[in-house]
Image (cartoon, rainbow, N blue to C red):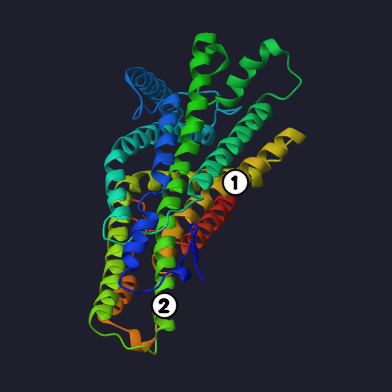
Amino acid sequence: MILLGNVKFSDLELDSSLEEKLNNIYAQKSDEFLPTLVYIFTLARWFGIPSYGGKFALCGAIVTFALVASLEAGAIWKLVRLLAGIATNVTDGRGFVARLSGTIFYGNALLSFLLSWKLITSWKKVSIHWSRAETSGGLYFPPDDNIRKRVICVTWFVAVCACVEHMMSMMSATGFDIPPGEYFHRYILSSHGFLLQPHEYTVWVAVPVFITSKLATIFWNFQDLIIILISMGLTSRYHRLNLYVNYLVKLEKRDAGIKKFGTELYIQMQTWRRLREAYVRQASLVRVVDKKLGTLVLLSNLNNFYFICLQLFLGLNKTQSGLVNRMYYFYSMAWLLFRACNVVLAAAEVNDHSRRALPLLYGCPRSSYNIEIKRLKHQLTYDSVALSGMGLFKLHRQLLLEVAAAILKYELVMLQYDG
């Protein structure tokens, strides 16, 4: 017996009224993933992404772009001065690694802001394609009743963990033995030593830098959250398709000794044909999403890869002094690894679930085997469906091992040259 939503498929019979029963049961129910995702995208206008906002949100986006672009330009200028030999003070967070990391951090923030804005703006058209894949074809699948709760829980989890990590970074940058009046001054010079020297510090510069650094951190976490949530939605749809295959195979096994003629044989063929076409529409939907999401996937993985390597390198070469600094380093490293791994694993679930129905099809009884089942098996076997980074790499589980091996090689080379 298979339970989908609130309906037990074992209570239904494979007869001429099967489609009518499914239509009556599910016609009034719709999946809540798309409205929930749109709600989250709407909230994004509060930190500069105006796709679901008005003119005020657009003005805020322009100001956000100007702030992030200004800091990125300043970070690039400081890095160029260092490489050209113009800069003289290269200590206390103003060396090459610090300036390169600052440039990459704000470069990622700028690209993430623009790509997220572009993706959310185009999501209105993607939603139409998604809705058609859900509703067309004549087969009505029970909605995922828990998808809204899972999306909200993941969003809150990422938001809370990111806030904790950032607050710990602020405490690590300043310590506790500091007068309240000097906190802002010490924090800006400590966290943005690659950008500002003590004689360049003014409140009029520090305040925009402080605000922009928070926005950059939000964009970094938000780009990973977008990939995870969209992957969850695609995986949920594949999961429901696979459950439907499992249900049909069980019915075929139950009726294996009964020969079908005329109308019954026609209904059986049509049911399998419509199910196969549902997989075709789902694969098409994944490719549409991949075209819109690919640049963000590439940016996210490259940025996470760099900062994981950087954190490991700094941790292996520097002794963290103080309890707060040690706690921040381990928590920050754990959060970065956890988030990067979940981006890959969530997206890899799409590829994994796209083939999960194959073992079920191989268990279909020989007496019920037909041309549509054969076509579906061929389709699932040879049609590679996966999210990718602009087609340069596909996100699957093996990618984690490949990335881990690359990080290990990088760290060994850096340690060898650093020694």
Q: Earlier in the sequence, mark 2 or mark 1?
A: 2
Nearest the eye: 141 or 114: 141
Query: Residue 104, how many percent across, how many down?
Result: 45, 36
Image: 110 above or below 384: above
Q: Badge 1 local density, few (<14 within 10 Å), some, or many (20+)?
A: some
Check disc 1 and give the amino acid type.
Phe
- Tell me if I can see residue 392 in this picture: yes
Nearest the eye: 13 or 221: 13
Left or right: 331 in relation to 195: right
- Number of callouts: 2
Query: Residue 282, how many percent across, how many down?
Result: 32, 59
| Residue displayed at 68% across by 27% down | 171
Query: Nearer the observer, disc 2 or disc 1?
Result: 2
Check disc 2 and give the amino acid type.
Leu
Q: Badge 2 local density, few (<14 within 10 Å), some, or many (20+)?
A: some
Query: Residue 110, how many percent across, how many down?
Result: 39, 31
Q: CA distance from mark 2 to mark 1?
A: 57 Å
Residue marked by disc 1 = 313
| Secondary structure under the numbered disc 1 in the rendered image | helix
Query: Residue 195, how many percent across, how many down?
Result: 50, 23
Residue marked by disc 2 = 251
Residue 111 placement: quadrant: top left
